[in-house]
Structures are given as structure tokens and as C-alpha cells.
Amino acid sequence: MAEKKVSKKKRPELVTMIGKRKSAIAHAVGRIGTGKIFVNNHSLDSVEPEAVRLMLKEPIQLAGVIPSGLDIDVNVTGGGIFGQAESARQAIAKVLVAFEPSLKSTFLEYDRALLVADSRRNEPHKPSRSSAGPRRHKQRSKR
């Protein structure tokens, strides 16, 4: 019988991934490089507040030494500070998984939101009371 050749999957040169949270959208581009990570053209170490910086570093710390050979550039638009942070965090994690598929189980075990977008959205306001909210009704008095 002929032996099957087991081919190692070649690492991609360039990967583009998207992360979403509420109305924030992050576009991350990963390429083989020296380990630099930029968020909106700012170094990851210069991101403020500190809680956001720590949130963005989570997937990198979980991955270990793998990110040292990758350059990741993230552009985030829309939403608020923490929505942008969570979408950027998700985009970074997706890029890392594209370069190293064995990280997928680690990320899912730690926090599923690292790889799977939250599909919840605001409910649209209903007609004739559009300023009051989607489910608000007129207050009734019993007496």
C-alpha cells in the first residue's frame, strides 16, 4: 500500500479579520513581522484607559509566544470605548487563530466572545410613540 503524504498547512502571509460588538466594528490586518500591534495607528502600550489596554492584551497573553512573529494593525470605528475595545479584542483573537488554529480551543474555553460576535441589538422603537421606547405604554390609573 502507498503511504499518504501528510502536508503541513502553510501559514498565510496576510490575514484580514473583522470583530463586532454593538455598533463598533474593528478591522484587523495580520502579517508576518516583528510583533508590533497597533490600534487606530497607536501602539498597544499607549492605549488609554488601562482597563481597555488590558482587555486588548488578553488574546495576546493567552496565545503566548506566537504573536511575537506577527504584526497586527487594527482600525476601529463606531460605538463607545468598551464596545470598540471588545470588537478590537475579537478581531485580534481571530487573526491569531488564522495563523495558529490550535489556539481556537484555548480562546473558546477562556471566553467565547473572543471568537463569536454577540448578536444582540437594540429593539427598534414602535410607531406613534417613537420617543418613549419600543415597549412603553401609557400609564393607567386604577381609580
Image (tube, rainbow, N blue to C red):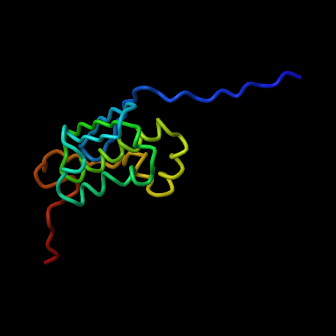
| Mark count | 0
Eyeballing the image, is 134 above or below 37? below
The percent coordinates of residue 92 (x first, y second) are: 36, 42
The residue positioned farthest toward the front in the image shown: 34
The percent coordinates of residue 125 (x first, y second) are: 19, 48
Side (left or right) of 57 relative to 1: left
Side (left or right) of 92 relative to 2: left
The residue positioned farthest toward the bottom in the image shown: 143
Residue occupying image coordinates x 18% and y 42%: 42
Side (left or right) of 4 relative to 71: right
Q: Quadrant of the N terminus?
A: top right
Eyeballing the image, is 142 above or below 53? below
Q: Quadrant of the C terminus?
A: bottom left
Work out whether residue 137 or residue 13 is closer to the camera in this orientation and state it: 13
The percent coordinates of residue 131 (x first, y second) are: 10, 51
The percent coordinates of residue 20 (x first, y second) are: 31, 42
